Amino acid sequence: MRTNLTLFAQIIQSLSRSSFKSLVDKHDTDKFQKGIDSWTHLITMLFCQFSKLNSLRDVTNGLRSASGNLNHLGLQKAPSKSSLSYQNQHREWQLFQDYYFVLLKKLSGIAQFKQVRFKIKAKIYLLDSTTISLCLNLFDWAKFRKRKGAIKLHTLLDYDGCLPTYINMTDGKVNDAKAAKEITLPADSVVVADRAYIDFETLYRWHNGGSYFVVRLKKSVKFERLKDKELPNDRHQHILVDEYIELSEEKTKDKYPKKLRRVVVWDEVNQQTIEIITNQFTWTANTIGDLYKARWEIETFFKDIKQLLKIKTFLGTTPNAVLIQVWTAMITILILKYLKASAKYGWCLSNLVAFLRLNLLVKISLHELLDNPFQTEPEPPPEIGYKQGVLFEWGD
């Protein structure tokens, strides 16, 4: 189980350095490197994410403690605190975003993240946002409330693998429906979202682009019933209504003039009804309800990145520094899910992170740790020859 490489060095070997070098040349991010090139910057920020350290000093000192193994990471020396701070402020965050998508294409093809819960051919996307609170005195650009700052990460998550295909960072005041106006969906895909995304102009644009939506309906939306669909008598008793509707208010009907499908589902867990609208008319009502139920996966994703990664507090205060940390967190969660999918042992993601974090600079085999983490040590050979006697003997 022992090896010449630290666990962190073995993880870094899964990255494509040649692809990263191409992106560095494209963005020209090594022009003013100030002693820390783009690769060193990336590895340092990934070390921050995997170890979940709290400050620039902790990150740089942590890498210095591995000084004899830095060449295995492709580094000549650990960066200084001031150099890392400078590059977080000035190096283009788009470099790390582009590299995330390069790795997503590479690793998802190897790990086969495909889920088979739904028997539909459409690609499934989950849309939502999460708010991260910030100190307004330090992050004065992150407007939210009068005395409170925050950012929002508007995220489009691929259901297969539950990894982002789109992230837009805004200040906390930007509402979800406004942020969704910038999202373009692939044809024949389906997006699942909560009622915060009820914007009929955006929904109609997605409809005209050949994609589908499954969105929870706001109670304030007025509509007229056109036709009821027959419900099955012997199954799916949680489906209460399946009907065709059209919007009745002039303001909303001008934005979405086509008919819609309304499905009402009984939520047994929360003891409430959920009204869903969609522009998909051929799938069963149960499939529509299950698609909306799958939206919870994006809530789990937000919980994972906040609890397991360094994303609730930041090493820099500028938008550029925050975005670099966000995208290196996405690279980290991608690597973690790749390792989880590749392992023979059935890891829980939080347990995998804990095991890796405890052994990050230990020289043990990554594959053996992933496949057999609780491997027992072999029995020691039987004792032969001289046997030490008892040092103390107690009398009666």
Image (spheres, grey):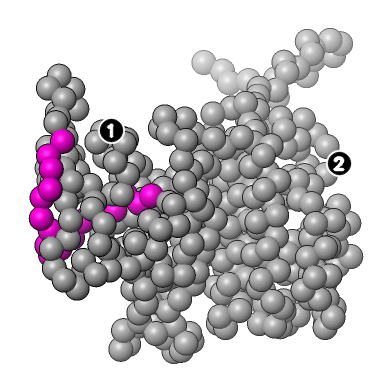
Residue that carries the numbered disc 2 in the rendered image: 4
Q: Nearer the viewer, residue 245 or 145?
A: 245
For the question of whether residue 345 can be seen, the reply is yes
Task: Please state the horizontal and vertical placement of residue 332, each as a whole percent of the image.
Answer: 62, 54
Extent of the magenta region = 212-229
Residue beneath the point at 16% across and 25% down: 232
Residue 198 in which image quadrant: bottom left
User: Is residue 108 positioned above or below 94 on the image?
Assistant: above
Q: Secondary structure at mark 1?
A: loop
Q: Amino acid at mark 2?
A: Asn
Asked which quadrant contains residue 82, the reply is bottom right
Residue 120, horizontal then vertical, whole percent? 42, 34
Residue matched to label 1: 284
The answer to whether 242 appears left or right of 158 in the picture is left
Q: How many marks?
A: 2
Relative horizontal placement of residue 163, taking residue 96 as reference (left or right): left
Q: Earlier in the sequence, mark 1 or mark 2?
A: 2
Q: Is 228 within the magenta? A: yes
What residue is drawn where x is 63% and y is 31%?
343
Amino acid at the residue labelled 1: Thr
- Of badges 1 and 2, the one in the foreground is 1
